[in-house]
Amino acid sequence: MHTDSGTEPPEPNTPADFPVPPPPGRTRWGRFCALAIANLIAAAGLLVLTATSALPVSVALSGIPVKVSAARLEGSGFLQVPQLDLTGSAGQPIALTTLISARITSLCQSTAVPTPIGPVTLRITSGEGAPVEVQDLVLNLTDLLGNTTFSGIGLGALRPDSEHPDGADYAQRADSLVIDDLRLTTRQLVAGTLQVPGLRFDVSLRGPECF
């Protein structure tokens, strides 16, 4: 039965009237990048707070190398033992290096973190005034370059003791050392305390590292 009410019946909905869901399994890269960079900045901000407050600090980003440069490092209680870092999918030879204390002039520390939009560089530098003060420094070194002077150096097997119960077949020890024009790369940096006067922090896309 048909009645003429004087109005046109509504047209049926077309596919354009409905939102098209994203294909399954596809990543929204813009949102992902924003979250990734926000997390990087948050982590770096925590590092800045610890560095300026003389609190314990640890830097390790899934095996991403950390680069450190300095005009001068003066350290005491030096110990270096070759080891194999098994944190990654394949073992990486490292030199486990510890210092009881150190004073560092013109410090620069940088890390380039891969992201879908390119490497994001986190960079920290110290001021030109007082040196950086470090206590209980531990590095997983992969390379080091600098003009170095050792005092009270000893090479050979490391006997087991309270601090190193397993000992080591080979180790280098020194009462103190001085390194000028330091350049090093480490897979991890841990310190009991790290004080950085005049600290400056930068985060940038494809920015320069310390070297």
Image (tube, rainbow, N blue to C red):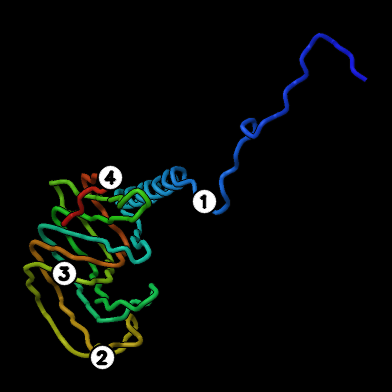
State the separation of the CA atoms marked 4 and 1: 27 Å
Q: Nearer the viewer, residue 124 or 101?
A: 124
User: Which mark sits nearer the N-terminus, 3 or 1?
Assistant: 1
Q: Nearer the viewer, mark 2 or mark 3?
A: 3
Q: Secondary structure at mark 3?
A: strand
Report how many numbered discs are placed on residues in the image.
4
Q: Secondary structure at mark 4?
A: strand
Q: Secondary structure at mark 2?
A: strand
Up-down: is 38 above or below 133?
Answer: above
The residue lying at 28 percent from left, 56 percent from top is 111
Residue 137: image quadrant is bottom left
Q: Nearer the viewer, mark 3 or mark 1?
A: 1
> Which residue is label 1 attached to?
26
Q: Amino acid at mark 2?
A: Asp
Up-down: is 20 above or below 181?
Answer: above
State the separation of the CA atoms marked 3 and 1: 43 Å
